[in-house]
Every structure is written in C-alpha cells, then in structure tokens.
Amino acid sequence: MCIRDSNMFQQLFDKGLSNSTVRYAQRILSVSMEHARKYHYIEHNPARDIITKFGKQGKTPDPYTIEQMQKFMSNVIGTEWEMPVVLAGMYGLRMSEIIGLRTTNIDLEKMQFGVVEQMPFNGPPGTKIITEMAPTKSNDRILPITEETLPYFLRQFDLIERQKELIAASGGVYYDNKLFIAKPDGSPQRRDRMSANFGQLIRHLEMPHIRFHDLRHSCASLLLANGVPLKQIQDWLGHSDFSTTANIYAHLDYSSKLSSAQAMVSGMPLPEAGDFGSRWEQNAEKSGA
C-alpha cells in the first residue's frame, strides 16, 4: 500500500478499522516520515500531503434490511460469529456488552438475560483474567430469550463446554472468566481485533459494508419498521435518555411515516394530476363569465 495512494485510509476503513484507529495509523506514518526526512533518508514527508485530506470517516453505512440480515445470518450460523451477530443484530447489544456478557447473567429457566455490565475499555493486550467489569453505558436491562433465539444460546453454552474439554485434553489452561463470548481459552475478546475480523468477514461474504456497531443500528431500524415505538426501542437498546434514541433514529421514524403515507395512497388511489388541471381551468372560465 503506497502512502501516496489517496484511497489508503479508505482501504483501512473498509477493513473494518475504527475512525480512531485509522487516525492513529495516520499519525504514526506522519511521525515516522518526518524522522526519515530529518535524517535525510527522504527529501520530504509525503504524509503531510495526506494530513489535509484526512478528515472524518465517510457516510455511516446504511443498516441492513430484513432480507440482508436473513442472508447474513444464514452465512454465519454454525460459525464463531453466530452468537455475536444474534446479540448485536437481534438484541441490539453493544460490542462491549457482548464480550462482557457473563454466563451467570443468563437464566435459561426464566428465559431471560441481563445486560448489567460491559468489558472495561482500558484492558491491556494479552489480558487473561478479568477481575472487574465496567458498568453499562446507560440503563441496565433484562431481555427475553425467545423460543426462536433459545437454540443459539444453547449452542453457545455447548461450545463453551467443548472448548473447556479440548483445553483440558491438550494440557492447556482455561481461564474461566464465565464469559459467554470469549476466546477458546476463556480469555476476553478484544474490541479492536473483533472489529477488524468482522470487516474481513463482511468482505469474505461479499455483503454490503457495515461496521459491527451497525448491526445494532440494523436492529433498531427493523424494530422501527415493524411499528415498535421509539420509547420501547430506547428500553430495548438501553439508552438512558429518550432524546438519544430520537436523535439517532428520527430519520428512520420519518421513513416509516413515508411508507405509511405510500401505503395509504396505494390503498386510496388519488385522481390524476391532469384532472385537477382541467377542473381548475373550467372553474376559472366560470368565474370570468
């Protein structure tokens, strides 16, 4: 990848890297090139030409439609992505809530699970044991496990047990953090690595580009499209303030209203525009007479 390539940073975005990660890469390149220029390895710092062109990430990807979500789910069933996609795309969990969800907060008898904590943001690379979780960004919430999603939960529990058995058989160490979504040895997943791997997954499946967090937006948009009020979506997503939900998804709410208007028009056909024109002329002639 050449630094002169104006699409360089967009290529990093396309790999699923976050805006902050790409900005960090840009800063590293700029500092490195400046040192090279200072010690006369190069004549000028080519990264400087990129700095003025580098701004905010482009348009936020559109959330997936129901058809796209169904296609995506059919491709990840039976893979390590199955449960994370269910939790993000159907339940609207944030990534930090997904990798911080503990098995002790899942009650299969009551058919519910609690989103009451999340993975800390400042965990160093290579962390094996989690001693303390962080509180959720907003309201804690209890979500139902439906008959449709129960099989996914059961398969994930089975996967955890198989991973424990394989680690024990190989003489390895299993770090029992009681995490529902974890690495094969039980240690916590890293957000940055999971985001990058998700970007690779999307490209491999040749699906429209989205970030992992956009599965949460897809969940909200599908709820809204099915007539769920914004207040209930707020509770489902765990926004502490209704204005947060309204500000993010107001444009989707307008889209649902537009669909309703179009449905009304199709159910009650209006006269052709030409009819109005001829009647207007007739009324004008009568008035002038």
Image (tube, grey):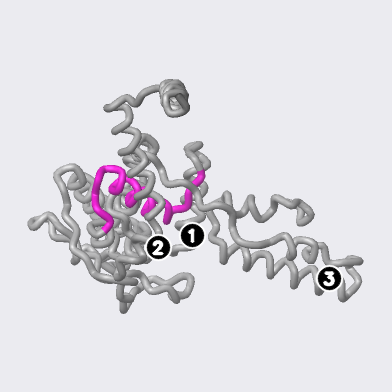
> Which amino acid type is shown beneath numbered disc 2?
Gln
Residues in magenta? 209-230
Name the mark on residue 36: 3
Looking at this view, is 135 or 230 the one in front? 230
Disc with the residue nearer the chain's start (2 vs 3): 3
State yes or no: discs 1 and 2 in contact (Cβ < 8 Å): yes
Residue 57 quadrant:
bottom right
Check the image and report above or below for 92 versus 288.
Answer: below
Q: Residue at x 82, y 62 (%)?
A: 46
Q: Secondary structure at mark 3?
A: helix
Residues at circles 2 and 3 in contact by the CB criterion of under 8 Å: no
Quadrant housing the C terminus: top left
At label 3, which amino acid type do we have?
Answer: Ala
**Gap in angstroms between the C-alphas marked 1 and 3:** 30 Å
| Alpha carbons under labels 2 and 3: distance apart | 36 Å
Q: Check disc 1 and report its element: helix, strand or loop.
A: helix
Residue 68 in picture, x, y percent from top left: 39, 37
Is 56 left or right of 268, judged from the image as shown?
Answer: right
Relative vertical location of residue 53 with respect to residue 149 in this rendering, above or below: below
> Any mark on residue 55, and which?
none
